[in-house]
Image (tube, rainbow, N blue to C red):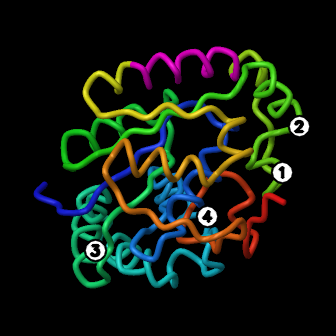
Amino acid sequence: MNNKFNYIYIAGYGRSGSTLADTILSASKNAIGLGEARYFQKELNEKRKCACGECIESCNFWSSISEKYLKNKSDFFQLYLEHLIQYSKENNIEFYVDSSKSTAGSIFWVFKIMFNIQNIKLIIIKRKFSEVIKSVRRGTNNYLQYNDKEKRFRLLRATISYYLSHFFAKFLSIFNKTLYISFDELVSNPNLIILKVNAKFNLSIDYVNENWNLSHQIAGNRMKNQKSINLR
């Protein structure tokens, strides 16, 4: 696909700050945060909300895809690509941020992205394994947000997925220009992260302040349901 926009893909395991990184990077006026875009169909079918506060069907970013997809159940990915191009032209969007990560469930999505979109910038976020497990013990995002039933053996599943996710992310870095970020660094100094991203990928993301308005993220961490995020 001959796209002019940049596509920032956040890889790594969950509970490592991908939604926060997505929010920080998409705070710029010429950016859109997509959240975990690979979950679009699931989020749409379950009538869940975009971070803008609207249901996905009525969100001013996702509604166009929703209407076409629901009308004839077309290939979502093709609709997605076409929409990114059209929306970027009409709204002067220079880059999108996709925080779908690099877990086993995202493998096919990642390869579709890599083969069909140009100007991909890869960010790999890593958090200490012990801290991830502490987060897993508190429950999944679906359980905490929607009271969905927890899966069995979640600690074992999380352990395996954690190491596989980072192995896959490392593999992706062979083919894409990559920036590595630690969770601690992301939380303690978000301004530095923006500077690093701009320097690494030659972008011009604006630093706003510590209170970011959310974009159009779907799925992901429940922080996307807040009106804003304040680290202080």
The answer to whether residue 105 is above or below residue 24 is: above
Q: Are marks 2 and 1 in contact (CB under 8 Å)?
A: yes
Q: Amino acid type of disc 3?
A: Ser
SS of the residue at dot 4? loop
- State the residue position of label 4: 46
- Between the C-alphas of marks 2 and 1, the distance is 8 Å
The answer to whether residue 25 is above or below residue 111 is: below
Residue bounds of the magenta highlight: 158-170
| Residue at 63 percent of width and 15 percent of height | 160
Query: Can you give x and y, in whole percent of width and height, for residue 113 in the image?
Result: 29, 44
- Between the C-alphas of marks 3 and 1, the distance is 34 Å
Dot label at residue 144: 1
SS of the residue at dot 1? helix
Nearer to us of marks 1 and 4 is 1
Q: Earlier in the sequence, mark 1 or mark 4?
A: 4
Q: Earlier in the sequence, mark 3 or mark 2?
A: 3
Q: Are marks 3 and 2 in contact (CB under 8 Å)?
A: no
- State the residue position of label 2: 138
Say if the magenta span includes residue 162.
yes
Dot label at residue 88: 3
- Between the C-alphas of marks 3 and 2, the distance is 38 Å
Q: Earlier in the sequence, mark 4 or mark 3?
A: 4
| Residue at 75 percent of width and 47 percent of height | 141
Nearer to us of marks 4 and 2 is 2
Query: Can you give x and y, in whole percent of width and height, for residue 61 in the image?
Result: 43, 78
Q: Are marks 4 and 3 in contact (CB under 8 Å)?
A: no
